[in-house]
Amino acid sequence: MSIHEEDVLGKAYDARLMRRLITYLRPYKLQVAVATAAIIGHSVLELAPPYLVKLVIDRYIPARDLNGLTFVAGFYLATLAGSFVLDYAQTWILQLTGQRIMFDIRMEIYDHLQRLDVRFYDRNPVGRLMTRVTTDVDVLNDLFTSGVVSVFGDLFTLVGIMAMMIWLDWRLAIVAFSVLPLIWVVTQWFRRNVRESYRTVRIWIARINAYLQERITGMATVQLFRREARDFEEFDRIDRTYRDANVKSIFYYAVFYPAIELISALAAALIIWVGGGWVLAGILTLGSLVASLQYSSRFFRPISDMSEKFNILQGAMASSERIFQLLDTSVEIRSGSSIVESRIPNPGSRIGRIAFENVTFSYVSGEPVLRNVSFTVDPGRRVAIVGATGSGKTTIVSLLLRFYDVQEGRITIGGVDIRDMDLHQLRSLFGLVLQDVHLFSGTIGGNVRLGNEAIDDEAVRRAVEAVHASGFIDRLPSALDTPVAERGATLSVGQKQLLSFARALAFDPPVLVLDEATSSVDTETELLIRDALKVVMRGRTTIAIAHRLSTIQDMDCILVLHKGEVRESGTHQELLARRGIYHRLYQLQFKDRELVGRA
């Protein structure tokens, strides 16, 4: 899936895409059938008024038949009332159906996005994905409410008007239809230019979304490095281009519709000139002339509507192609069926041995991050992983949780390859605390339980007290019910880190995974967390990725990664005695702290 896919417009009409779009109408076949019947009925009633005018002029006025005039007037009003009811019915049904289809498509897209692997999000900007779920789906709504079904009404109206004009007087019908070549030329010009204009508009609205998402998310960095003016100029350029593209499309509409009206007026003038002469010569009745004029004016209305529907169709084809390309993106991380036996979620519950067996992995082909990595973590053991930046520490956690799949070797839990395990059950075994904490808008308590109703307020309270987060929470206006801003903007880094610990503990997992979880907290907070972890890790399998070696000195085993390979393993004292890589890392940190202490 290319991040520049907005640049590709696709076909004006793609039968394959249309067949796939029609499938979304199937659950609403009854509503579509009723709407179609209402549209056809409305089109039939629209044919009646001009013919009624002909009857009045040619029959009842010359005969001074008041009863006949009264009957026709009543029938005329009845057709108008019927047209109103049918038009209301089809508009209401189609709009309601369109909203339901939009709901279905958005839910399908979001469900698919939740199942896509992390690698997909590494290479696709969030702003463009937002465009798929919002703007592109809105475009499809126009297709379902104003295109797929209602186009039958336009076609039926056109055919009906042509039949009535030919029936009234075929010669006068030929006069009216003589302007159709002009209609064809104007319509082709409009379609060709609007197609290109629409492509440009779609490109730049997607770029606006992507730019805004990136800059708003990184606003602190923008302000820190004083990029406000430069970023404003860049957004001004993007926004200005988007505005100009819309203005250009407005120009084509501003030319097209008056041109259609002008051609319609030309057709009316020809009918009046030729037909009026025939009336004077007695070849044509006045009623037929007036009815032909009315039919002529109604004939060009669906033509302009159908040209507008071409634009809707064009947009729908482009949007559906991008939506289906997203939906067709294969889910690489698929759930298996094996279940690992464990006693969840009791404290101290254990699972089988975790084993990395000759694991090799690379994010970019030919550039392995891990090379032939093998190690085991026995149940209830506490294992730390250390190493320089880029050595592959976080990658090990990502592979264990199947955010990515290994390319060589395998990872097992209790002897079962994790690729064969049920994905939901696999991830429920782990409590993960990351260096970069993500909080959702809501409340403090809601961010701890994350929608799991099995975790009651008392369990949340125990979790926050265990990690010593209750100190700052109790000082908040509403304690656990205090609102949290988007991404936890109102909380400090340390406070968010404490909440992430509480979140992991509230779910009470058999395995606790800490990914440099104390690197963003101050020394005082770190001491509180270390004290809490001693209780939490007792009898529980723990894997800790650490930057601060002081936090993992009492671990049962420490693995030292270097350039994607496990180069050393042992306890803190054993590794220091070897005077290898771990010893050098420890000496560097010790010197750094000594220098800070002297300062």
Image (tube, helix red, strand yellow):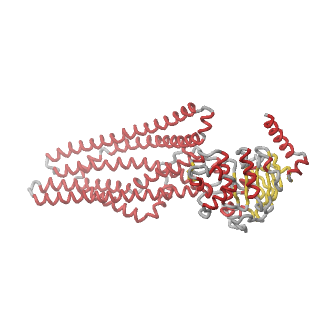
Residue plotted at (41% across, 41% down): 189
Q: Nearer the viewer, residue 304 or 105?
A: 105
Name the residue rendered at 24%, 49% in the picture.
294
| Residue 212 % position (x, y) | 55, 41
Q: Quadrant of the C terminus?
A: top right
Q: Vertically, is 37 above or below 123?
A: below
Q: Tell me which corner region of the image, top left, top right, bottom left or bottom right, holds residue 276.
A: top left
Q: Position of residue 497 (x, y in %)?
A: 67, 49
Q: Quadrant of residue 194?
A: top left
For the residue pair 323 and 15, the one nearer the viewer reads as 323
User: Is residue 2 in sight in this rendering?
Assistant: no
Taking the image as shown, residue 46 lies to the left or right of residue 346, namely left
Rendered position, 401 above or below 546: below
Left or right, residue 46 beside residue 69: right
Q: Answer left or right for 495 relative to 88.
A: right
Along the line of sight, which residue is nearer the eye, 206 or 38? Answer: 206
Residue 33 at what x, y percent from top left? Answer: 39, 64
Of residues 176 and 534, the one drawn nearer to the viewer in this rendering: 534
Which residue sits furthest left?
64
Visible residue check, residue 314: yes
The number of callouts visible is: 0
Measured from the top left, where is residue 558 in percent x and y? 83, 52
